[in-house]
Image (tube, rainbow, N blue to C red):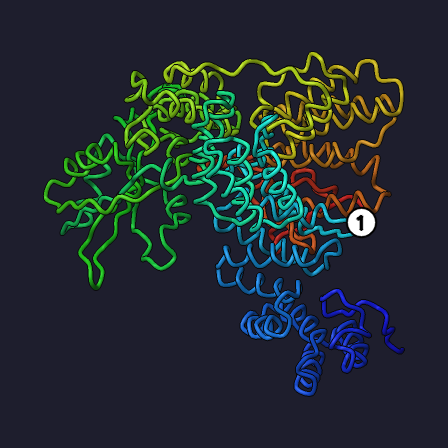
Amino acid sequence: MSVDSYAICPCGNGKKIKFCKCKDSVSQMEKVLRMVEGGQVVPALDRLKSILEEHPDAAWALAIRGRLLLGLQEFDSLAENAERFIRLQPSNPLALTQRAAVSVAKGEMQTATDSLLEALNESGQSVDAFVMDVALLVAMGLAQSGSVLSARQFAFLPLGASGFESDEASGFMESLDQSQAINLLLKHIPELIDCPDGVEWQERYDEAMSLLSSNKILLAQDKFESLRRTAPGQAAVLSGLFCCAIWRGDIDRQSDIARQLSEVEDLDLLERQRYGAIAALLKERDVLAVQAANIRVEFKDVEQAEMALAASNRCKQMEAAQLSRLRIDEESVPPRSAFFIADREIPADDADVSGADLPATVSIACVYGRQTDQEPHVIAYDVAADRIDDIKTVLSDALPEGQLEVGEQLPTPLMSNLDPRPVRLRDPQSLAELTTLNREFTVAAMPQRALAVQINLFGGRSLSDVVDDESMALQRAIYVRILEGYERLQTIEGGLDRIREVAKVDALPPLKVTAEQAGRLCPADYFRVDTSELDTMGIYYLAAATRQIGARLESYRFATELVEKVAPTASTDDEKQMALQGYLMAISSAPEPTIGISTANQAVAFAKLHQLNYSPVLMMQMELCLMTADQEGFRSTIMEIEQNYGNDPAVMARVQQILVQLGVIRPDGSMRGAPAGPVAPGNDFVPAPAPQQAANPASEGLWTPDSPGGGDSSEGGGGKLWVPGMD
């Protein structure tokens, strides 16, 4: 096949082959592409090397070679290829994109973003798919370095590109949206602030905005910087600089400009507070992190030390099963024992106390025996600065002969300090009891801790310390807005109200929105939306949007409201499907598994009444039954699937896929263990066996058609889990 000399050259410079320097060698491209399509990547690379030796200016060969090297993750070779490509064509977008990919691999994110932005600028209206692939790579590197807003900005490039589809980009964006560790304020890039009417610098501002919209970020940044000198403190100019800093992945600059925006008095007070919160979140290590240190005590007799710690009324020894899962450091010697250190005296094991009265774990103290270069010692890990003296007293009282040393104080994440774990007196007897205890404990402990932690936002003091300091009024409000952006705190009944009351910060008023406005909301505003003026489509959008960003509490609220409005009177096919979708969203975002199961039962009844496909409901119900170790519910759900969808291969394949993902079965159908699903992180509760399992010790605990009491695994290797359609 001859090469069309009037086609655009694949080297990426935008010229036609007839007018490109590649014209003398591009005739060999067809053979190389056939090799690549046939999976002969290494021979293709060898052939490209030969072509480049014969034709050093064959930029198309450098372009294709760079794609192949990136796919193989041969970054050293890619770096050499990119530099050669750039020397040959300094403004070639594919050459600049290759350099961006190399910079990501090196962790040089500033160079990566600048190179990719330059590539986008040089690409004009026609952007190569390779640029979009590397844009996602840059987004991933930015997320890993903690630049969340920049990661979102670059991930939007492949997602919004016409004719470019990427499941990987969609999955990456979903991971950002669903992450509970990312504050809601960082799941949204603030909109640009409009320029005031009639200002004398309007024309220069418009020029800067034109450059920004054309992805000429570095030029736009220079324009905005010049404007800032002319019009200092203008929100519109700072907003443009903030956008440029996001594009460049510069966290320090983003935080600094967001802080400046929080000080612009012309802005709405809530907007100022939220910019201040964004500034703090972007520099969490410096502003919000809680200082903590390890406390080490060295002694002579390790057994005596263990007995002394076990006898302390502030320590509870970790069980063997918990200790086996404890990982302090992959390279360190495992501890021989470990103890939970409580924030107060631990009640007796037989004491009848509610979850609210359980003491909180302040630190885990690990006991190590004598080692080649160390005496026996205990280390209490990550003790917050405000608790160091207290824990020193606990350890000194238990080990009076020991030599105590406090390590260097280092920053630890705010949320890990606000979300303590209870010291349980005994194992709960059911998942319901565990859930109740955890809820009661969290309602009491988490807001209290939020008031007590000492952070740099308050100059190393706590919120309780600065409640009467008027110079800290804005900082108190910023702290409250930060806490409002965490789903974990939103789920605590009355918790944020208690914090706001102490902080002397008013709760935000209900927000009435139209369907059009609902699409432009900041995720942090969803919790206060008043839906009284929304139609069912508006509520449906809110339920879907909150589910997408991981705001489960609000998604459940909107989804149940949608069901209540639509389901009772659903008559058209659209209304029936909308109601079913509302049920599905309510099940997936239910605050507790038991509520999800109850909602699933309602959804099944609704679907049967209106003759709808309810297999997705049964899938969710099956997962929830496994999570709660509800064997009877699991058995009846499996029977329902077999009875109604046993002849549907897609449904049966999905059943097996779910069970494999949950770790119940192996891909070949053999069982891994009983259906005792996961519980909240940090909880070591294992549900009590169901009656059939208790009666038959050999049972794996899963119902099969041939053995109502469970499969017999006594023949070695365990039984096979029966999945409908497998027999």
Asked whether the viewer can see residue 493, the reply is yes
Taking the image as shown, residue 28 lies to the left or right of residue 418, namely right
Residue 313, x across and y down, in percent: 23, 30
Q: Which residue is mark 1?
A: 727
Q: Is residue 11 above or below residue 469?
A: below
Taking the image as shown, residue 373 lies to the left or right of residue 571, namely left
Residue 716, x across and y down, in percent: 60, 56
Residue located farthest toward the top when viewing the structure as drawn: 532
Asked whether the viewer can see residue 691, the reply is no
Image quadrant assignment for residue 8 = bottom right
Q: Residue at x 39, y 14 (%)?
A: 504
Towards the viewer: 86 or 409: 86
Q: Is residue 365 above or below residue 236?
A: below
Q: Residue at x 78, y 36 (%)?
A: 641
Towards the viewer: 542 or 300: 542
Towards the viewer: 465 or 220: 220
